[in-house]
Structures are given as structure tokens and as C-alpha cells.
Amino acid sequence: MKKILVISAATALLGMMSCSKEEMPVPGGDGNINFTVTIPGNMGTRAFESGLVANDLQMAVYDADTGDLVVVPAEQKFSDTPEGSLTTNVSINLASGRSYKIAFFAQNKASNGYTFSPDTKTITVNYANMATNYNTEVFDCFYTLYETGEVTGALSDNIELTRPVAQVNWGTSDLADPVVTDKNAYGANASSLVTKVSTKAYTTFDMLTSDVTGEATDVTFPYLARPDASADYPLEPTKYKYVSMQYLLVPAKSSVLDITLEASNSASAAKAMATVTVANAPVQANYRTNIYGALLTNPYDFTVTKNKEWGGNNNWPVVPTEIKTNEELADALQNGGNFIIPEDTEVSLPTISETVKIDKPTKLQVEGKMTLPVLHDGSTNERNLKVVTVNSNLSLTGGGTIEADGGDMMFNVNYNNGQLDIDGVNLKYTCTSNSNRAVINTGKKPTTVKNSTITANCIAVRHNSSGKLTMDNCILNVNRKDASDPGMWEALFSRGNINLTGVTINSQVRGLEITASRDTPFEAMLKDCDFYAESERVLYVESAWAAGSKLTIDGGKYSCKKTEWTYDRYGYPESPIWFDNNKSGKKFDCNIISGDFVTQPYGFLSGTWPDWTIDDVSVYLAPGSEWEAIDVTTPHVYKWRAVKK
């Protein structure tokens, strides 16, 4: 069903303004603009989608070229009757010869859930004001930004408003089970049942970009009784009954979030009786995310879908779907969802000659083996091929293996939209012989790799963006491609923020390089790592271009085949551990708390050969730490130890 909102010349909106004429001139009356506006709605529905509660219409008119606020038409209601209405009539006079953008926002102002701010061009959400009645439809809202083009006279047009928010619906099939209705559980008819929901969501919506802005923040909806029993759950309402419902401000494009529901029989309970945690639940503005199953008695057996009535339909079974054939693997990577490759199962994609694109949120639990075979025909395409490009959210978990042979990147993360998280999956990659690329190439969103082994003949991770790379309990085995390979590249390269804990590097080439971008400082933490490189350096840190970079080393071992720093034939230094600051003379904040090192760091502040300013190695120590000479030769050479006194 559609909610029809008709805007015509029957009602003038310029009689009331949010500011005086001296502050905001009213456009001339030679362009009478009339609209017919439709927004989703369902008269008489019992599933929180009527749209009738969004009775207050607010508008703002902006100059299309400058974005400046031109006029704020008077607010009006769709209806003054208790039954509500899906139509209203509006007319706006605008000056000919100019182009405008008109923001429309429909809400229930009495709910105090949203603030429409024409001056700042934003809509903000106050989740705290939703605390006492978030389980109702009162926070439903609708929005669109309409562009007039150049006004040349009277204009009539049709506009569709859609929701800038997602609706999250929790449904359970066990509400009438005796174990649920027991007096010591949730009571007769589950009358004592209360739930709370925790997640992250956005608070600010930019009206001119029609999308969220800023960062997601922690949101907790406190314990509340379940929605009215008369409300039908969106899917199989005879089987599933509402437990909870929330409106969340989320991005216009599909994204994922972690969300947790806790159920108890008292709002003052110290501990929840049932907890349902959903990782990577898909959400999107104007979509419904439906989470359902036996939530109170079996909180790990449930399914998540997006309902088509809210703009689309993507299935997200929380109990993963098994992949046992090559065809099932190809279908899963194309369509997204939650899947598992069982133990002792091997699946493979057809021979890859073009990049495999992950365009939808995908969670893949790899317990067996997955192969990504590249067509070897010696072509330029093979040498430059990104085997898999992650354009959405890809989560890889389990204890199995993914292998690829060929191309120049195994997982290439889209710079703006991609996100990759790996936990437990081992990656084996052989890139094309004349390529020097990476197993993982990150984007600007955070990348996490945990409890995994990466074996490759190229860079294990190339972190070349402004995002953050976190690695925990990982082993990187990096080899030369062949005997002729000089190994003048790194096992791990980062051009951004990085946090490594318990990471082991066994490298036939160099170890770790951290290089600041020209205008952005980095923050790096190395904790209890073990690096060894069969080359001239194990650790290279350059903060040459931007002031403010910070490095902390807390424990670990750092060694390589070369055990002394020297000069090459051009008079340039070669050091196993090298801190390079000379491009700008801007020293970075280095704090070595503890650890064993093949040499003390070599570093210089500014200048060119032979007039370098050499750093004193004591400046690299954290306050309270000092250097001690040691003599360790097995399994590698360590000559200096930083200790905290």
C-alpha cells in the first residue's frame, strides 16, 4: 500500500516563516510550484507501517547552486482528525530564473525523536527521547530532497518520500512455550517480558546529501515491555510475535551493524535471562531488518531478513547456510548472506579471468578449503588481476583455508565502501611472478585480521589508506618469488594507523614498514610481536612528511640477517631498524617500552648527506625505560634489550 501526500495550490505555505523578512527575503511570486508527493504507507495496518503518525510536515528551500537557505515554509499537518490522513495540499511561490532544492520531512513532532534544522541543513535523532516508547510507530518518519531545476513558471510534479531510517524488528516463535510462561520465567502470556537493545547508529542526517554524516555512536534502548500484542510481525505473523522494535538512522547504502537484544522478566534485573547477539546484521535506510527465531528459548537459532515492503528483500540466516558445491559457492559470493564451508569440504570457483566482486554483505565461515583458481594464459589481465574485490562487507571466520594462484592481489578492498574482517581463516597466495603486490589491499574502513596465518610470495597486507589495520595473533610467512628476486619489499606495509599484537613475521624479504602519508600522521602500536627478516632491515618507520606521528613498542623481538647499520655505495644508510624523519625535520613521538632488538634504532632528524642530524637512541625510549646490552644468538641475533625499570 502507498501513502499519498498530495501537495497542490490549495494551501499557501509562505504565510509563516522561521525568520523575519529582513533576515530571509521571500522569493518573488512568479513561479507557483505544486507537488504530488507519495510515501510508503498502509492504511489500517497492524505491522508498524501505516505512516499515519508522521502527521507534521516540515520543509526548507535552498538555493541549488550555493546551498544557502532561501525560505522556511510554514509547517502544516496532514490532518486534524484522529484518524489521520495520507494527503495534504501545498503551494510554494519561487522566483523564476533560479534553481532550488526543497527538503521535505514528515514526522510526529510531539515524539521529540527528531529535530529538523533548516539552518544547519540537518535532521538529528535523539535516541534518549525514544527510551519510554521506542516500541511504537511514533518515531516513523519520511524524507526527500527535491530539485526544481531552473524555475521558468508554474510547475507541478510528483515526489516520493522515503524513510531515512531503518526499522529493526525482533520476532519470536516461543512466546507461548510453557518454559517461557512459567511464573519464574516471563509469566502468564509473557506479561513480565522486557527487552533492551544495544547497537551503534548515526545521529545526524545531512539534508543536502540525503545521507548520514559523522560517525556511528553507541545506542542503548533500555528495558521495555514488548510492542502491543495487536501489532503483526512482518513475516509469518501467525508463527512469530513481536518482542521489540526500533528505528535507527543508518546509511543510505547497505551496511552492517552488530546488535544485541537482552530479555528479562524485570527492568531491574541484574542479569538477562536470554541474550541474542547478531553480528553483521544488514541494515539500510528505508529497509526493514527482521530478526526472528526462538529468541527466548534458543537465542542462537534465528534468521535475519530485510522485508521488501521497506525497499528490498535480502535474506540473512543467522544459522549459516552450508556450501558443499562449486555452484553454491559462486552463488553465495554473488548474492551475499551468511554461509559455511563445512570441515572436510573443498569447493572452488570456476577458473577466474575477471575479478570476483563482493557487492553485498557476506559472512563466510570457512572450516574446509576454498580455492580461487586464476586462468594462467600469460596475459596482462592475469598480471594485473584483482582476484576478489570487496565492495561491501566481507567477514571470513573459521579454521579453514582459502588459496589463490595468480593475479596481483588476492583480496582488494574497495577504498570507500569495502570492509574486510578475518578471524581464524588461513590465506595462501601465489601472485603472478612478475608482480609485486599483496594478499590483502585495504580501504579506508577498519580492517581486522585475527588468529590467521598468511603465506605468500608477495606483501601479506598493504595498508595504504587512512583507515586502521588491526592484527592479533597472526603469522605472516612471506617468501621471495624465486632465486632472482632481490627481496626489496616488505612482508607488511602500512600507510596509516596500525595495531599489531602477537604478530609473527617470518620473511625472506624485509619486515614491517610504516610510512606516514604527506599530510596525515599515523599512530602505531607493536605489542609482543616477533619479527625476523632475511634481508637488510626488519623495521622501517618513516614519519617524514607530517608532524604528530606516534610509535609504541611494548615487548617482542625484532631481528634480521643484517646485524649492523652501514652505508651503501651511495653513502645512504642501511640499518636493520631505521626511523626516518629527514624529509621535514619533524620528529615523531616514539615510545619503546620493552623488547629485544638486533640493533638499537638508527634515526636522523633532518639534513642531507653528509650533514645529517643523527638522533640519540635514548630519545626513542619511553619514560622509565632504558637500554641494556645483551648477547643472544639463538634463534636469531639480539644485541639490545629495552627494559622498563
Image: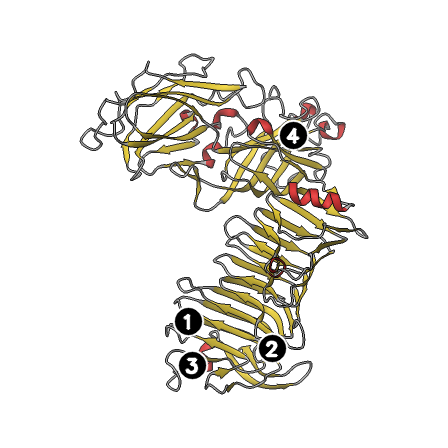
The quarter holding residue 44 reads top right
Label 3 to label 2: alpha-carbon separation: 30 Å
Which callout, 4 or 2, points at the residue further toward the start of the chain?
Answer: 4
| Residue 171 numbered tag | 4
Left or right of 140? Residue 11 is left
Left or right of 293? Residue 62 is left
Element type at marker 2?
loop
The quarter holding residue 243 reads top right
Query: Which one is closest to the eye, mark 1 or mark 3?
Result: 1
Label 1 to label 3: alpha-carbon separation: 14 Å
Image location (x, y in percent) of residue 491: 60, 69
Image location (x, y in percent) of residue 571: 45, 86
Circle 3 residues within 10 Å: few <14, some 14–19, many ≥20: some
Image location (x, y in percent) of residue 124: 41, 37
State the residue at coordinates (39%, 87%): 610
- According to the picture, the residue beneath numbered tag 1 turns out to be 544
For the image shown, how many numbered marks are present on the structure?
4
Query: Which one is closest to the eye, mark 4 or mark 2?
Result: 2
State the residue at coordinates (57%, 43%): 257
Image location (x, y in percent) of residue 158: 42, 22
Q: Is residue 448 above or below residue 107?
A: below
Label 1 to label 2: alpha-carbon separation: 26 Å
Label 4 to label 2: alpha-carbon separation: 60 Å
- The image's colouring method is secondary structure
Which callout, 1 or 2, points at the residue further toward the start of the chain?
Answer: 2
Furthest toward the right, the residue is 344
Q: Are marks 4 and 3 in contact (CB under 8 Å)?
A: no
- According to the picture, the residue beneath numbered tag 2 turns out to be 486
Query: Which one is closest to the eye, mark 3 or mark 2?
Result: 2
| Residue 615 numbered tag | 3
